[in-house]
């Protein structure tokens, strides 16, 4: 197949409105909300082939396909290499749903949305949301789409945490959980990285206690720094050395604080690009959701006890150079699942791309995932 034949093609987002008040895990309430989502493929007559794709921190509902036929590369979905006809998540066999989580900044109700109580954007008044809250709103969307049970829920990083939570909150509504480059909870080091990123935003003079929208500014400097810190943790040292090394942009040291090394240029570019496309309040909310996720918390730290109610089959994958969500964290998940007699497939994949490996089309990774998805389809 050529690339066009393996693409879901031109796609458009859809919007689901929920008018009922939702009570969040924090105790806060929202008087209705919107979820923006996309679908690819067709739901079969038995409604048994639906797969939910859960996004990570900076992801959204635009999983596959493109918005602009004249500029496909720039408007391509973030996991397009995985989703499409003939790809591992084959849209000839599966009905794939991608959703922008509550609190997001790509169309779903979030801090940028209109607050009916103040007639202004929510800003900092938007309540904190958790992985548990996201799963509950995803379940409401599934009801709206007529999906009683997911054939699979799949996600990488924070998306993998959502897949895990589906097996705990709605064990009867998920047959397979595909958990990639994830963890059962954040380590202290990971929480520390998130806090540094948040402080970069909170201390930006343009943050204005989260109500920067009405002032016509964004905390660009803080958001830029937050992304730079985060991006360092997504890459491996080997990848940075191979891609940039100590390569200078000029032939000699210039003895100033402008960009001299190529890695500096790359990080600044990533920070600028992110600040142009992502909302600072959403970043704060999402990193706190990452920090809070810990299904074993209510069980005295016993992950085995937490997974006692899970019923799904599992595919768990990790990457050798991922130091933010190291393979050892996936091992914890696998051991807790096996303790409960659940069916688990595990793959530890050699890839130099660090935590971001789950976004790449490494052959062994995609072949292994395709084989598991083929079993589900069959």
Image (tube, rainbow, N blue to C red):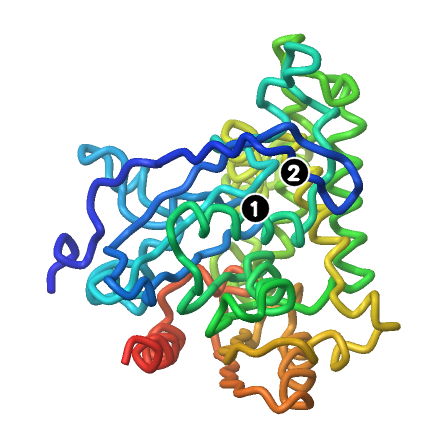
Decide: is 259 above or below 148: above
Q: Looking at this rendering, what residue extends furthest in the right direction?
A: 300
Residue at screen point 52% across, 62% down: 156
The percent position of residue 208, horizontal first and vertical second, equals: 76, 17
Q: Which mark is residue 137?
A: 1
Q: Quadrant of residue 62?
A: top left
Q: Quarter of the image for the N terminus: give it.
A: bottom left
Distance of mark 2 from mark 1, alpha carbons? 9 Å
* In front: label 2 or label 1: 2
Residue at screen point 66% across, 78% down: 333
Q: Is the Cβ of the residue at disc 2 closer than 8 Å to that at disc 1?
A: yes
The percent position of residue 124, horizontal first and vertical second, equals: 74, 25
**Viewer-proximal residue, 184 or 71?**
184
Decide: few, some or many residues near mark 1? Use Cα within 10 Å; few <14, some 14-19, many ≥20: many
The percent position of residue 269, horizontal first and vertical second, equals: 51, 36
Residue at screen point 28% across, 66% down: 46
* Secondary structure type for disc 2: strand
The percent position of residue 155, horizontal first and vertical second, equals: 50, 61
Q: Quarter of the image for the C terminus: give it.
A: bottom left
Q: Quadrant of residue 67?
A: top left
**Viewer-proximal residue, 258 or 351?**
351
Q: Which mark is residue 22?
A: 2
Going from N to C along the chain, the mark reached first, 2 or 1, is 2
């Amino acid at each position: 197949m050529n690339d066009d034949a393996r693409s879901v093609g031109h796609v458009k987002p859809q919007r689901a409105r929920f008018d009922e008040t939702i009570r969040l895990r924090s105790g806060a309430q929202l008087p209705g909300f919107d979820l923006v989502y996309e679908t690819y493929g067709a739901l079969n007559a038995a409604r048994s082939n639906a797969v939910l794709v859960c996004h990570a921190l900076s992801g959204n509902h635009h999983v596959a396909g493109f918005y602009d036929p004249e500029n496909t590369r720039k408007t391509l979905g973030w996991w397009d290499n995985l989703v499409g006809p003939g790809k591992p998540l084959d849209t000839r066999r599966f009905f794939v749903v991608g959703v922008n989580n509550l609190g997001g900044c790509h169309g779903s109700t979030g801090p940028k949305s209109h607050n009916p109580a103040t007639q202004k954007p929510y800003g900092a008044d938007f309540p904190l949301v958790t992985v548990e809250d996201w799963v509950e709103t995803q379940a409401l969307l599934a009801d709206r789409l007529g999906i009683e049970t997911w054939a699979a829920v799949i996600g990488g990083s924070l998306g993998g945490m959502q897949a895990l939570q589906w097996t705990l909150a709605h064990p009867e509504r998920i047959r397979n959980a595909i958990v990639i480059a994830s963890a059962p909870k954040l380590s202290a080091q990971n929480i520390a990285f998130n806090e540094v990123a948040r402080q970069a935003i909170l201390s930006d003079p343009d943050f204005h206690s989260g109500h920067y929208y009405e002032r016509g500014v964004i905390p660009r400097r803080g958001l830029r720094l937050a992304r730079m810190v985060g991006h360092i943790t997504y890459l491996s040292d080997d990848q940075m050395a191979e891609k940039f090394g100590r390569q200078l942009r000029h032939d000699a040291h210039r003895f100033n604080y402008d960009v001299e090394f190529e890695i500096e240029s790359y990080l600044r570019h990533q920070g600028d690009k992110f600040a142009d496309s992502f909302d600072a309040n959403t970043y704060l909310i999402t990193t706190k959701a990452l920090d809070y996720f810990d299904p074993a918390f209510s069980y005295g730290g016993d992950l085995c006890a937490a997974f006692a109610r899970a019923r799904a089959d599992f595919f768990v994958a990790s990457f050798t150079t991922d130091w933010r969500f190291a393979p050892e964290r996936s091992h914890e998940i696998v051991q807790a699942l096996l303790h409960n007699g659940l069916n688990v497939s595990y793959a530890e994949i050699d890839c130099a791309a660090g935590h971001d490996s789950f976004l790449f089309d490494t052959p062994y990774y995609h072949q292994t995932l395709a084989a598991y998805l083929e079993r589900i389809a069959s």
